[in-house]
Image (cartoon, rainbow, N blue to C red):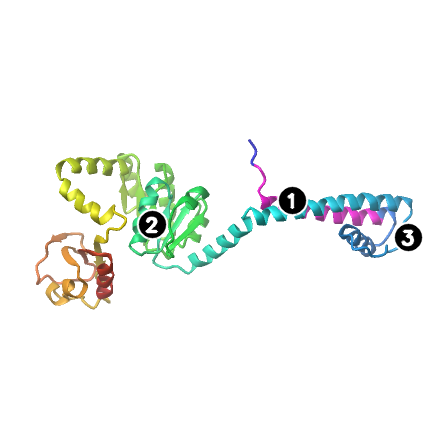
Amino acid sequence: MAKEPTPLKNIYISLICLFGVLVGGTLGYMIVEDWSFTESLYMTIITVSSVGFKEVRNLDLKGEWFTIILILFGMGTIVYGITNLTAFVVEGDLRKILRKSRMEKNIDKLKDHFILVGIGRVGKNIAYEILRMGYPLVAVDSNEKNLAEFDSSSHNFFTLLGDATSEKTLEKSGVMRAKGFVSALPTDSENLFVVLTARQLNPNLRIIARVNEEENSEKMIRAGADKAVCPAHIGGLRMASELIRPAVVDFIDKMIREKDGKLRVEEAMITSSSPILGKTLMEAQIPKKSGCVVVALRRACGKFEFNPKADTILNNGDAVIVIGEIEKITELKKLVS
């Protein structure tokens, strides 16, 4: 079934019709009355606009009938155009276009942000957690309804309507300046294509991809994803954990699932410019200065050290893993960076 024309498309049609009337009227006067192009165009404009100016020259009978036809077509075109323009404003299309333009300008200013492709059932939970931690997020979806239904008043939340498999759409999302990227589309084939495109545009981007079939995880990683997550697999582990270790699950829920929960497990990366680079954990005084508890250390080589000792030296590329409140974690990142 053919799609119903949008108000914006109807405005384009109105402009084309008006242009057709002007061209037809000008040619008509040139042929019927043997006038010059300028005289014919002038007569056409004052006739269609109904300004009431005097005719360029006296009209013969054929010219009078042609003028009557031109008035009918011209007035019909103008009424049609006014109707479409009113519908365009009343139905909110003008507001949508202005909002889209403003949103794209704001996205152009972003740096070190996160991008989420697909804000469906899985994507919404990803978005809520990223925004809860205070990070800027650009959500990309080809379904305008999904973007409109997401309930967020965060000033860090930006939306982009478009096909994420297109390089142009990902470029608009600021993928070259982004810090992290999540592809959470419904099918593995879509996520695979998005991951390939994102990796090609930004080789240094950290990419997480959703997979529906666990056996596709390896393919997704070969395509460029750093990690592939299967919601069905994670859900199964969660249900088993509810049976085996309910207290642990309750503790994790306090950190992640509760909307008002402020406790998180977080990481802070040690860089070459970090003020605590080369210091021991005792000298860094992370618990005292930030209020966070250090539970592990991931070395640059990928090796984990759980419950590291006080004399453990912090090196470039290490990640300090802590438990703390969101506000305290913010203090930790200020201390580390």
Side of 283 where 330 appears, left or right: right
In terms of sequence position, does the residue under pointer 1 or pointer 2 come before the other?
1
Give the crowd class for mark 2: few <14, some 14-19, many >=20 residues within 10 Å. Answer: many
Task: Name the chief secondary structure element in magenta.
Answer: helix
Pinpoint residue 318: horizontal percent, then vertical percent: 19, 58
Q: CA distance from mark 1 to mark 2?
A: 40 Å
The residue under label 2 is 181
> Residue 200: horizontal and vertical position, in percent?
37, 49
Q: Residues within 10 Å of mark 1 (few under 14, many from 20)?
A: some
Name the amino acid type tagged 1.
Ile
Q: How many marks on residues? A: 3
Write the residue at 10% across / 54% down: 307
Q: Is residue 164 left or right of residue 69?
A: left
Whether residue 140 is visible here, answered yes or no, is yes
- What residue would you read off at disc 1? 13
Residue 298: x %, y % from top left:
17, 54
Name the amino acid, label 3.
Asn
Q: Which mark is residue 58?
A: 3
Rendered position, 239 above or below 162: above
Q: Nearer the viewer, mark 1 or mark 2?
A: 1
Q: Which mark is residue 165?
A: none
| Residue segment shown in magenta | 4-30
Q: Quadrant of residue 155?
A: bottom left
Compute the Cα span from label 1 to label 3: 34 Å
Question: What secondary structure is found at the residue carrying circle 1?
Answer: helix
Q: Are marks 3 and 2 in contact (CB under 8 Å)?
A: no
Q: Amino acid type of disc 2?
A: Phe
Q: Nearer the viewer, mark 3 or mark 2?
A: 3
Question: Quadrant of the image for the N terminus?
Answer: top right
When the figure is inspected, residue 230 is found, relative to residue 207, above or below; the finding is above
224 w.r.t. 316: above or below: above
Is any atom of residue 164 visible in this view? no
